[in-house]
Amino acid sequence: MDLSNLAVVLQAALSPNPAERKAAEESLNQFQYTPQHLVRLLQIIVDGNSDMAVRQAASIHFKNFIAKNWSPLDPDEQSKILPSDKDLVRQNILLFVAQVPPLLRAQLGECLKTIIHADYPEQWPGLLHWVAHNLQDQQVYGALFVLRILSRKYEFKSDEERVPVYLVVEQTFPHLLNIFSNLVQIGNPSIEVADLIKLICKIFWSSIYLEIPKKLFDPNAFNAWMALFLNMLERPVPLEGQPADPELRKSWGWWKVKKWTVHILNRLYTRFGDLKLQNPENKAFAQHFQKNYAGKILECHLNLLNAIRIGDYLPDRVTNLILQYLSNSISKTAMYNLLQPRLDVVLFEIIFPLMCFNDNDLTLWEEDPHEYVRKGYDIIEDLYSPRTAAMDFVSELVRKRGKENLQKFILFIVEIFKRYEAASIEFKPYRQKDGALLAIGALCDKLKQTEPYKSELEPMLVQHVFPEFVSPVGHLRAKAAWVAGQYAHINFSDPNNFRKALQCVVAGMRDPELPVRVDSVFALRSFVESCKDLNEIRTILPQLLDDFFKLMDEVENEDLVFTLETIVDKFGEEMAPYALGLCQKLAAAFWKCINTSEGDEEADDPGALAAAGCLRAISTILESVSRLPHIFAHIEPTLLPIMRRMLTTDGQDVFEEVLEIVSYMTFFSPTISLDMWSLWPLLMEALADWAIDFFPNILVPLDNYISRSTVHYLTCKEPDYQQSLWNMLSNVMSDKNLEDNDIEPAPKLIEVVFQNCKGQVDHWVEPYIRLTVERLRVAERPYLKCLLVQVIADALYYNASLTLIVLQKLGVATEVFNLWFQMLQQTKKSGVRANFKREHDKKVCCLGLTSLLTLPADQLPGEALERVFKATLELLVAYKDQVAEAAKEEPEDDDDMDDGLETDDDDEDDGSMGVDAEDGDEADSLRLQRLAAQARSFRPADDDDDEDDDDFSDDEDLQSPIDEVDPFVFFMDTAKTLQASDQLRFQNLSQTLDFHYQALASGISQHADQRRVEIEKEKLEKASSAAAAAAS
């Protein structure tokens, strides 16, 4: 397509006629991979005579094509852009980037970012030369624009990846310094000068973000830069040309220069100018900075802050950054000494006014209360807020310099309280009272620990906070609720005061003003956590939940959901009557949040956070009623649509939360419905496609399906669940690109099949063993090796004769058993076993090895029988000792423990046994720990330290079919069967045992007899408990 035709097609792509537009888009897609297409698009973009709308359409198409095709994701994939076209684009984009209008420059900038990230320095070595040359020529703006993109590539890179930036700094910083110096000397500079200085500041920021380039360690070079930055810091921002609109004003070029200057100086101070943080080679730089610049910057900052005192303008972000600098100075003696003479002015005339309710707050409160609430609970807003920075300054001041400052600050606050009390209603300083309450709330932790304030907290709340619950001013009612929440955990000497505060907070949930209602719900969480007598809340629970959901209909806020979770956690099974209604409301709120976040492109969208919160709250409800399985069938229809949709790629942001719900539903429901089974294919598709990182989480519901609905798993042919499981496991375990820790759940799933489907999956024994052995040969992590060997053990327990035949048919029997026995013998330096460390691991190995004992001599010769018998005895003794040790150390509160399921990885490398050992860990699956079913996935926690190996214990909730099998009883019964079936073989075996093994066998025999008695006793106790429960 030639240039003129391309322009016509682009014009048609803007047509209001849908048919014309579609035809044009199809034409563009058809010709996009033809040679010269990209070059022609660029020609149209830079052609000043072309229609602006067409140029813009060309720039968007150009940007999208480059983003998608310049650098293929797969390194083996051939690029769809000819090398000659790439060269032409690289040469010409640099020439025109500064000449096109800002709207098009933004698009070309995105293209340059993609190209530089992919090509520099290897495929575009001449780029740096072009930049350095044009910094000395007429193309200064274009060179700065490109250099900004280039430097940003390395902003967060460290170590070797950062090396190219050193050459960039070496070749460009002298020119930048020269340009900067000339720009600073211009009298009455234009806004274009500000744009150039801003670009230089951004380039400097990206270049020093992680480390100071060696070139700047030269005091002359660094001093020259600092002189210019201090000049920009001290220089008043020009009054002429400042926009009147506050939003435009803060983005105005000269204020942007001020912001970036403060930003850079803060970074130098906090990261490189602190002697405590520096490594030895940077210490001289830190000393130089502290001695020559830290104090000067502080002085300039204090002068800038003076604008707040006298009512002048200072952008919020600049204020926030300056206060961060001041907060960082408090702990440094020399800096604090410089700050001290002006501290009272800063504290009482700048910091405190920033903490008070202001005109902007009032406007937002009245005109957009939803936005007021959003800003108040937004972490990102906090990063830029002067008020948050002011609170942080006060907190840091009383924490580090409390002796000289806490009392005078509290006296100042008390004075405001008194003035407020004394004033008549029309003259009360409402805004100052709001700031005083904020201060008291912010200092909560310090005041709760410090006398005499600690003893006065309750009277202070009663006298100065509680009355504001009924204030005529909404923002004070909201602040009263927030402060009450901060102090809900103190010990109230008069329970009536706690009761009154709780009642006021609950009443605040029905306040006419939205921010009051939200702050009241947030405060309620603390009161629920602190409440000693739940009757205080129990009687109003239905009304409370009703108010709560009315508020959730109005506001998407994660903190609201946290409060609901706390209530559900606290009341547990008492929530049963409300469980269905709560889940329905939360499901509705979830869909609303999802619809909101889908319409909002922002990554930090509160709707997405609140959606995840809704799902967590649903999980908390399901957990609270887990002992009431009949409820789950009623809840299921409400949750099914969420599970179906969110187990696809649509649910990637909430996948863990959804999997937890699926885990609860498949574990606690009386039966697994066909509707729930319909989720199985979605789990398989997700694992095959994109969800391998979630395999440990997916393992839990898959285990539940197989273990709790075994018959359906085995008999259903449409779909064929056995085949789909095999397809997934064979793909995962044979994928060479997956790390060992990625596939650890796979052998656990094979174990689930063999243990739950005994005698019913003979045809899967050979495929699964072949798959296991193939992965065992290439496995490196000891923990994965243990899991794979345990698959062999499970297969032996499933059917020893069949398994041994399969191993011999595959020609791997000797190899597998040699490796297994080596792993059983391997120990760490401390003497403890290096492998099969959990009780569960040892038990599985015991059952597998014991199952071999009854095989006839032609399958298991006498020598092999002796080896297996001895290894099993040793393992049984180790298992017995571990169980006894765990019983002694049983924790009082399981909820605060990890699952205690450890990896088998350690720090040793014992090559002599032919078994590798290396570090390894596996991330916990967050809240799935709390699920009873979680334990059944046998997921490990970190276990890298040699000393900690004796400290782990198996989780008591671990459930599998082998729970009912006692390995000692099973061993003795198997030995008796061997004795009865082949007395001569048993006699020969007994004669090969030396005194040590005879003693072990005798001890195991006695322990098996003891276990038989204990098992019978446990059965009787269970029967008795069941009968008592039925009678009641």
Image (spheres, rainbow, N blue to C red):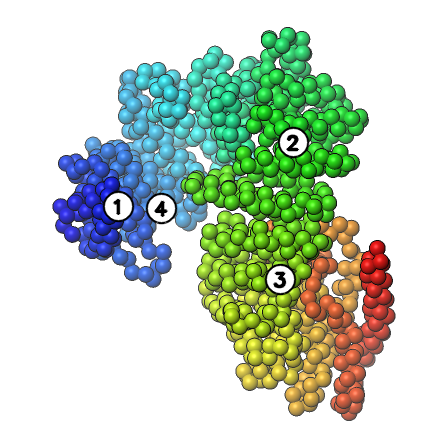
Circle 4 sits in a helix, a strand or a loop, which is it? helix
Q: Is residue 451 left or right of residue 299?
A: right
Q: Which residue is mark 1?
A: 18
Q: Considering only order in the chain, which callout, 3 or 2, is on the residue closer to the N terminus?
A: 2
| Vertical relation: 411 (above or below) 288 | above
The residue indicated by pointer 2 is: 523
Report if residue 215 is visible in the image.
yes
Q: Position of residue 501 (x, y in %)?
A: 71, 26
Tell which circle, 4 or 1, labels the residue nearer the N-terminal end.
Answer: 1
Name the amino acid, label 4. Answer: Pro
Dot 1: within a 10 Å radius of its alpha carbon, few (fewer than 14), some, or many (20 or more) residues?
few
- Tag 2 and tag 4, C-beta contact below 8 Å: no
Which mark, residue 672?
A: 3
Which numbered disc, 2 or 3, marks the residue closer to the eye? Answer: 3
Displayed quadrant of residue 432: top right
* C-alpha span from label 4 to label 3: 58 Å
Which of the two residues, 239 or 905, is positioned nearer the viewer here? 239
Q: If you read the primary sequence from the N terminus, does the residue marked by circle 1 or circle 2 appear first?
A: 1
Distance from disc 2 to disc 4, alpha carbons, whole Å, reads 52 Å
Instruction: Check disc 3 and report its element: helix, strand or loop.
Output: loop
- Residue drawn at (19%, 47%), measured in percent from left and top? 9
The reply, left or right, for residue 209 in relation to residue 812 is left
Q: Amino acid at mark 3?
A: Ile
Q: CA distance from mark 3 to mark 1?
A: 49 Å
Quarter of the rendering occupied by the C terminus: bottom right
Residue pictured at 32% horizontal, 61% vertical? 77
Q: Disc 1 to disc 2, how far (Cα)?
A: 53 Å
Q: Secondary structure at mark 1?
A: helix
- Tell me the kind of residue under disc 1: Pro
